[in-house]
Amino acid sequence: MAIRNLAIIGILLAPLVFLSCDSHERTSRPTVDERTVGVGGTWVVRTHARLPEAGSTETELWYGNDERVARIVHAYRYYGDDCVAYDSPDGGIQHDYFTCGRHSPLILGPDSRATWDFEQDALQQRGIENSTTAIDHGDQRLSIPDAKRLANAQPLRGSQ
């Protein structure tokens, strides 16, 4: 009698086990391929391939392994002394930044939509298209020593 009851319980539980396995398969996420590359100093970028077959990636800028500074980064350059320039969208608008160590990022040209070139010896604002479809030339140039001085004067991240 006990064996018969166990067999009946097994028959009743089998569909539940099957359904729970099927549910897991339907809700599992695609494999995420992550690659970490040192930029310089304490800075690293992590690239996540969300859908490798579609070419979908996301690159993040991290300070060490414990502090994500920017979620989506398209360009970056290391300048020594634990300082890095990078671009990242904020509120749907692309901005360029310069930061050193644990200091808050300095926004380059905060009142302009012009982008910046990360040159070897300076940060140079690029021109943008104006309303007449002519190019307005970027008029700001920031030397790397000046950028480092300004960035190190920023408050520490998280202390604002």
Image (cartoon, rainbow, N blue to C red):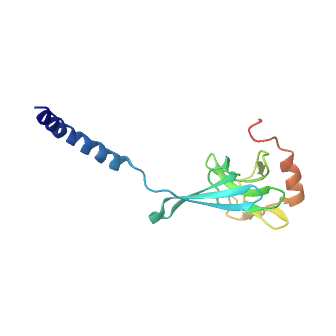
Count all numbered tags in the image, as a single digit: 0
Which quadrant would residue 134 be assigned to in this image?
A: bottom right
Q: Residue furthest front?
A: 2
Is 100 on the left-hand or right-hand side of 7? right
Looking at the picture, tell me which residue is in the foreground, 8 or 64.
8
Name the residue rendered at 74%, 38% in the picture: 158
* Residue 109 visible, this orientation: no
Is 73 on the left-hand or right-hand side of 136? left
Which quadrant is the N terminus positioned in?
top left
The vertical placement of 20 against 53, above or below, is above
Which quadrant would residue 132 be assigned to in this image?
A: bottom right
Which quadrant is the C terminus positioned in?
top right
Q: Position of residue 37 (x, y in %)?
A: 66, 62
The vertical placement of 31 against 24, above or below, is below
* Residue 70 visible, this orientation: yes
Looking at the picture, tell me which residue is in the foreground, 57 or 93.
57
Is 65 on the left-hand or right-hand side of 155? left
Q: Position of residue 128 (x, y in %)?
A: 71, 61
Name the residue rendered at 72%, 59% in the picture: 115
Q: Residue furthest bottom?
A: 120
Looking at the picture, tell me which residue is in the foreground, 81 or 7.
7
Name the residue rendered at 69%, 57% in the picture: 44
Is 37 on the left-hand or right-hand side of 27? right
Name the residue rendered at 25%, 45% in the picture: 18
Q: Position of residue 14 (x, y in %)?
A: 21, 42
